[in-house]
Image: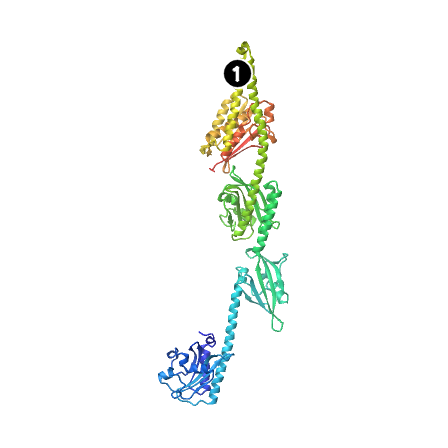
């Protein structure tokens, strides 16, 4: 269909055809348009033939074609006799007669768009007035076409502009001179969110939550569009939107007045660019720098934790963050640090520890992957309803802190608004957790290096001492045997040989323990884990120790459950128990009380063995687990021993993924605390 053919509706075409017929004093009027090489019907009055019957007539075979070709009126008084009528026209083919008066419809450039014609079924002498009347109708057709084509062009340009505006990345809003919103593009609708863009920005509700770059609330009269309406031209004006069920958004606004032909203000337009992601990326880089700086300056993760969490809370614009460290032996995560936003008034209770798989941190440890909880106030959100209600928290994010596959801790953050999952936030928190993991691992390596150097030096000194003592005795008594006369050899020989044998046995025992310790450390010694009843193993060791100290001023009491099953190597754990109970007896030379207690704490078994003996000083506690170390009190009292028992015990316990330490003890004596996991690792 031609563009100008769409210009006049069929109703307007029929009215124009009727006007032509009356003006030319003819029974019929016709308006049709040129579409390439064919004619299109757009209006008729009093026609004696159906247009459908002649609609496919080619332009060259019609009287209209003569009008178009000559671009001038065509007047035929008698169709039957006029030689200008084309031979292939419907008039000739149907043997029709009558008269024809046609005038071209032209555009501004003179191009023929269509034809207005008057028809008579009988020969007709067309007067000059008739010709002029049809010509006036053609001019009217030109005006109608021009006006309608103008409307079409405006509509086309409007559609073009709408398409352009709707595909912009900026939200665009325009108002008229009275401040009424007259244009809002699709992007602006999306920026506004689920709420409809208000018709009147002067309403207080329309600017709720809006602040300028300095954080000052924006009043209705200070809206950028109204400022532009007053003549201001704004560039990169900052605006912040908070609330409305979404996180904080940041915008840059350009606005200017729309001027009329005389320079008067007829409206205003503003373009709003969402720079939240850009600002967030800038904050992310700042946050990562703050985290790295805090970690670099802190001696421990506990010291760095508050500054790290402060950077996280400030960057996300959230409310609260926590750092948890995994205690694998006890089967819990322990709180290392927490931080609240300074603007947050409520106290948020943070438990000291959470068992494996319990709470948000415990579940993230168990899952080994990030967890995003959209609203902790909902059922099964991993946060207790009491905590969620009292703290008024909503969205929560938990990120495991890992070194490879080894869990080290969990980083959690909470918002007071409901937030949908965002990959960028998860990526940021994952990056921060990686920095924390590197810090923890680096500190562990540095501590181990220092400990290794110290232990190596002590180890060499102690090995030299412990091995030198029996070797010196063996050498001395061997020399006595060699130099003894027959009488002395007969009298003292057995006693001297007994001393040599005792020292050789001690030397062999030291060497065996060193070899076993080396095998355990390198993984060459087999530790076969299978379900065992630890309570039964402890009970057997206690009974054997009681039997060994019968008649001694030492009492052994125990507090054991009926059964406590866990994965372990029965022989190795019995070796640990015998060592610990043997030490408790050995270091209680003046008698006393030994207490053995076994219980379940979280997902770990906890065994404590306490005595009231000579005890271990605070500074020597950790050294007790380094090979061949013996306390000064034991050396002063000449209590026998190699100093390898606790070292071997720690190696066995660690192969069970557990821990052993000398814990706090009230009064004289020592308490050894062993933790073993209840679940297979």
The location of residue 253, given as percent across then percent down, is 60, 61
Q: Residue at x 42, y 79 (%)?
A: 59
Res 446 quadrant in image = top right
Q: How is the image coloured?
A: rainbow
Give the labeled residue for mark 1. Answer: 497
User: In the displayed image of the protein, which residue is found farthest to the top?
Assistant: 487
Query: Between residues 163 and 176, which one lies in front from this camera angle?
Result: 163
The location of residue 44, given as percent across then percent down, is 42, 81
Residue 169: in sight, yes or no?
yes
Callout 1: SS: helix
The location of residue 311, given as percent across then percent down, is 60, 48
Number of numbered tags placed on the structure image: 1
The location of residue 97, given as percent across then percent down, is 38, 87
Query: Between residues 107 and 629, which one lies in front from this camera angle?
Result: 107
Query: Between residues 409 and 395, which one lies in front from this camera angle?
Result: 409
Residue 142 located left or right of residue 630? left
Residue 394: in sight, yes or no?
no
Quadrant of the image containing the N terminus: bottom left
Q: Residue at x 52, y 69 (%)?
A: 158
Q: Is residue 555 above or below residue 203?
A: above
Q: Is residue 620 above or below residue 19?
A: above
């Amino acid at each position: 269909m031609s563009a100008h053919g769409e210009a006049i509706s069929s109703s307007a075409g029929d009215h124009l055809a009727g006007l032509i017929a009356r003006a030319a004093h003819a029974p019929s009027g016709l308006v049709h348009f040129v579409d390439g090489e064919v004619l299109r019907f757009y209006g008729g009055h009093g026609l004696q033939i159906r247009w459908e019957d002649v609609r496919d007539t080619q332009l060259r075979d019609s009287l209209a074609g003569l009008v178009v070709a000559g671009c001038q009126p065509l007047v035929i008084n008698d169709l039957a006799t006029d030689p200008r009528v084309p031979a292939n026209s419907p008039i000739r083919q149907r043997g029709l007669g009558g008269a024809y008066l046609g005038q071209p419809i032209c555009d501004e450039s003179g191009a023929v768009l269509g034809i207005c014609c008057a028809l008579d079924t009988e020969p007709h002498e067309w007067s000059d007035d008739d010709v002029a009347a049809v010509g006036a109708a053609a001019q009217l057709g030109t005006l109608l076409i021009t006006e309608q084509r103008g409307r079409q062009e405006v509509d086309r340009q409007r559609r073009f502009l709408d398409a352009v505006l709707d595909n912009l990345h900026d939200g665009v809003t325009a108002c008229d001179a009275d401040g009424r919103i007259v244009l809002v593009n699709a992007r602006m609708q999306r920026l506004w969110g689920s709420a409809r863009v208000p018709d009147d920005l002067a309403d207080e509700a329309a600017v709720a939550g809006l602040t300028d770059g300095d954080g000052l609330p924006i009043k209705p009269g200070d809206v950028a569009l109204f400022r532009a309406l007053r003549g201001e031209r704004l560039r990169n004006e900052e605006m912040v939107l908070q609330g409305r069920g979404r996180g904080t958004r940041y915008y840059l606004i350009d606005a200017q007045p729309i001027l009329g032909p005389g320079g008067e203000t007829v409206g205003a337009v503003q373009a709003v660019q969402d720079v939240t992601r850009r600002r967030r990326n800038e904050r992310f880089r700042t946050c990562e720098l703050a985290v790295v700086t805090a970690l670099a300056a802190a001696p421990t993760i506990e010291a760095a934790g508050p500054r790290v969490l402060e950077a996280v809370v400030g960057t996300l614009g959230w409310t609260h963050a926590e750092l948890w460290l995994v205690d694998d032996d006890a089967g819990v995560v322990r709180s290392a640090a927490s931080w609240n936003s300074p603007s947050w008034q409520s106290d948020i209770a943070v438990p000291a520890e959470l068992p494996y798989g319990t709470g948000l941190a415990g579940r993230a440890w168990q899952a080994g992957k990030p967890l995003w909880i959209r609203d902790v106030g909902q059922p099964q959100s991993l946060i207790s309803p009491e905590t969620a209600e009292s703290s008024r928290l909503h969205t929560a994010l938990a990120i495991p802190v890992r070194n490879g596959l080894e869990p080290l801790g969990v980083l959690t953050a909470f918002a007071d608004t409901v937030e949908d999952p965002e990959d960028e936030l998860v990526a940021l928190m994952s990056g921060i957790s990686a920095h924390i993991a590197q810090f923890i691992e680096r500190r562990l390596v540095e501590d181990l290096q220092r400990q290794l150097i110290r232990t190596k030096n002590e180890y060499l000194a102690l090995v030299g001492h412990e091995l030198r003592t029996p070797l010196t005795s063996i050498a001395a008594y061997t020399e006595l045997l060699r130099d003894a006369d027959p009488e002395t050899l007969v009298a003292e020989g057995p006693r001297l040989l007994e001393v040599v044998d005792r020292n050789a046995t001690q030397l062999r025992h030291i060497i065996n323990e060193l070899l076993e310790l080396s095998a355990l450390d390198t993984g060459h010694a087999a530790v076969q884990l299978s379900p065992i009843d630890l309570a039964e193993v402890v009970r057997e060791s206690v009974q054997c120790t009681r039997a060994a100290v019968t008649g001694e001023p030492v009492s052994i009491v125990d507090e054991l459950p009926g059964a406590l099953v866990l994965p372990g190597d029965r022989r190795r754990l019995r070796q640990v128990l015998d060592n610990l109970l043997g030490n408790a007896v050995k270091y209680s030379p003046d008698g006393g009380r030994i207490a053995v207690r076994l219980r379940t704490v979280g997902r770990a078994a906890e065994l404590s063995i306490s005595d009231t003996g000579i005890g271990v000083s605070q500074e020597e506690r950790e050294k007790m687990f380094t090979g061949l170390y013996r306390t000064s009190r034991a050396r002063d009292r000449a209590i026998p021993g190699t100093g390898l028992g606790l070292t071997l015990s720690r190696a066995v316990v660690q192969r069970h993924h557990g821990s052993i330490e000398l814990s706090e003890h009230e009064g004289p004596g020592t308490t050894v605390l062993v933790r073993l996991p209840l679940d297979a690792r």
